[in-house]
């Protein structure tokens, strides 16, 4: 999906034409329908990009491991790289930010938009702080193991 996605532009034009034909009483339903289609296209694009990024990281990790480099150790929760979780949350947050912003702005105007973004930022900050704490604990545990030897 590019900045000027022709299919999404056609959908928007069709939605605007339908609004002209049907009148303002169907505006909410038309907007919801368009936002669902836009969110689905965005979700598909995000999923495609995340898969490509994960494949690149796995390929790079395999190259390092096969060329005598340090093998990547999984974290206790089974995920190889904590930055993948951060990237995933950031991508998902942005994917949901678009329809949530529209819903907040349509229903409660500026206060709704501000509350929506405060929630999105809050979730990302909380996740980042939790991840940082987990990483520090893992590093401390590694240092203790090294000291025991």
Image (spheres, grey):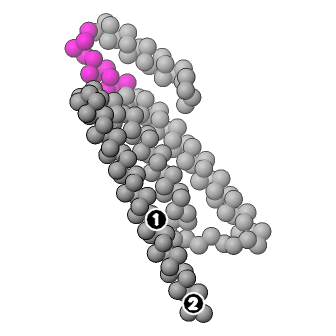
In this rendering, position of residue 28 left or right of residue 145: left
Q: x and y percent of residue 35 in the render?
A: 37, 28
Residue in the picture at 61% in, 47% down: 52
Chain part drawn in magenta: 23-34
Please identify the quarter of the rendering in which residue 59 is found. Answer: bottom right
Q: Secondary structure at mark 1?
A: helix
Where residue 90 appears, x then y in whole percent? Answer: 46, 48
Other residues around mark 1 within 10 Å, as few (<14) / some (14–19) / many (≥20): few
Q: Relative to residue 106, is residue 25 depicted above or below?
A: above
Q: Label 1, on which residue?
A: 132
Residue placed at 73% from the left, 71% from the top? 69
Q: Is residue 71 found left or right of 2 in the rendered image? A: right
The label number, if any, that marks residue 147 in the structure image: 2
Please identify the quadrant where the C terminus is shown: bottom right
Q: Which residue is at 34% across, 11% downward?
A: 18
Q: Position of residue 115 (x, y in %)?
A: 28, 40
Q: Position of residue 45 (x, y in %)?
A: 52, 38
**Residue drawn at x 45%, y 51% as measured from the top left:** 89
Q: Nearer the viewer, residue 81 or 26?
A: 81
Residue 46 in the image: above or below residue 147: above
Predominant secondary structure in magenta? Answer: helix
Quadrant in which residue 66 is drawn: bottom right
Secondary structure found at label 2? helix
């Amino acid at each position: 999906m590019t900045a000027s996605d022709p299919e999404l532009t056609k959908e928007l034009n069709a939605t605007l034409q339908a609004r002209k034909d049907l009148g303002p009483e169907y505006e909410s339903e038309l907007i919801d329908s368009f936002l669902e289609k836009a969110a689905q296209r965005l979700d598909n694009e995000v999923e495609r990009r995340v898969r490509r990024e994960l494949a690149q990281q796995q390929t790079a990790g395999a190259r390092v491991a096969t060329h005598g480099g340090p093998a990547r150790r999984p974290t206790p929760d089974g995920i190889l790289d904590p930055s993948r979780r951060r990237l995933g949350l950031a991508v998902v947050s942005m994917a949901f930010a678009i329809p949530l912003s529209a819903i907040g702005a349509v229903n409660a105007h500026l206060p709704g938009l501000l509350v929506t973004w405060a929630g999105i930022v809050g979730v990302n900050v909380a996740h980042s702080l939790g991840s940082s704490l987990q990483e520090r604990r893992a590093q401390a545990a590694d240092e203790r193991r090294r000291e025991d030897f």
